[in-house]
């Protein structure tokens, strides 16, 4: 896979984040999207790569309140973390 294809795949994943922000935390698309991005990163960089780990561990540990508002805020936090991770990966790919 060449640099242009890698960047296009990463940008496509990042471009899907704004639409997911409009959804409720309980939507099934979020998990499917995250798993799809992880599979893409595995295909590009390998399962044990720093890029894969960076994305997979982006949210880290978070404290969430088990209320509707708390769960929605946690969902937004995770999306922010994953989006920032993708932006970092895109920048890294563009510099190679």
Image (spheres, grey):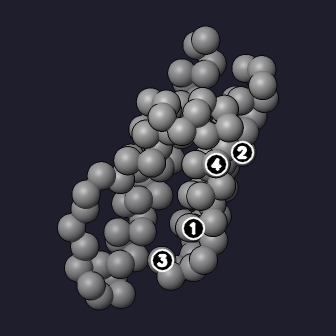
Disc 4 target residue: 39
Residue 76 vertical position relative to residue 7 in the rendered view, above or below: below
* Residue 83 numbered tag: none
Label 3, residues with CA under 10 Å away: few <14, some 14-19, many ≥20 = some
Q: Residue at x 71, y 29 (%)?
A: 6
Q: Earlier in the sequence, mark 3 or mark 1?
A: 3
Residue bearing the label numbered 2: 12
Check if mark 3's residue and mark 1's residue have beta carbons within 8 Å.
yes
Q: In this image, 79 relative to 69: left or right?
A: right
Q: Earlier in the sequence, mark 4 or mark 2?
A: 2
| Front: mark 3 or 4 | 4
Between the residue at mark 3 and the residue at mark 4, the CA separation in whole angstroms equals 22 Å
Which residue is at 29% across, 88% downward?
Answer: 67
Q: What distance separates the C-alpha of mark 3 from that of mark 1?
A: 8 Å
What x and y, as percent, mark residue 49? 49, 31
State the residue lying farthest toward the bottom.
67
Sequence order check: which comes first, mark 3 or mark 4?
3
Whether the residues at callouts 4 and 1 have beta carbons within 8 Å, the answer is no
Residue corresponding to mark 1 = 30
Measure the alpha-carbon separation of dots 4 and 1: 14 Å
Q: Are marks 3 and 4 in contact (CB under 8 Å)?
A: no
Residue in the foreground of this view, choosing between 40 and 15: 40
Look at the picture and state if 78 lies above or below 83: below
* Residue plotted at (73% across, 20% down): 3
Please state if 94 lies on the left or on the right of 9 as rendered: left
Find the distance from the CA under tag 2 to the CA under tag 1. 15 Å
Q: Tell me residue 12's x, y (percent).
A: 72, 45
SS category of the residue bearing label 4: helix
Q: In the image, residue 76 lies at what x, y percent?
A: 42, 65
Q: Secondary structure at mark 3?
A: loop
Residue assigned mark 3? 25
């Amino acid at each position: 896979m060449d640099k242009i294809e890698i960047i296009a795949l990463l940008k496509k994943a990042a471009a899907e984040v704004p639409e997911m922000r409009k959804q409720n935390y309980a939507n099934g698309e979020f998990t499917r999207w995250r798993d799809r991005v992880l599979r893409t990163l595995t295909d590009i960089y390998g399962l044990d790569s720093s890029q894969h780990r960076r994305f997979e561990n982006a949210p880290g540990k978070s404290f969430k309140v088990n209320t509707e508002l708390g769960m929605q805020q946690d969902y937004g936090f995770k999306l922010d973390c994953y989006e920032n991770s993708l932006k970092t990966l895109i920048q890294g790919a563009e510099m190679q």
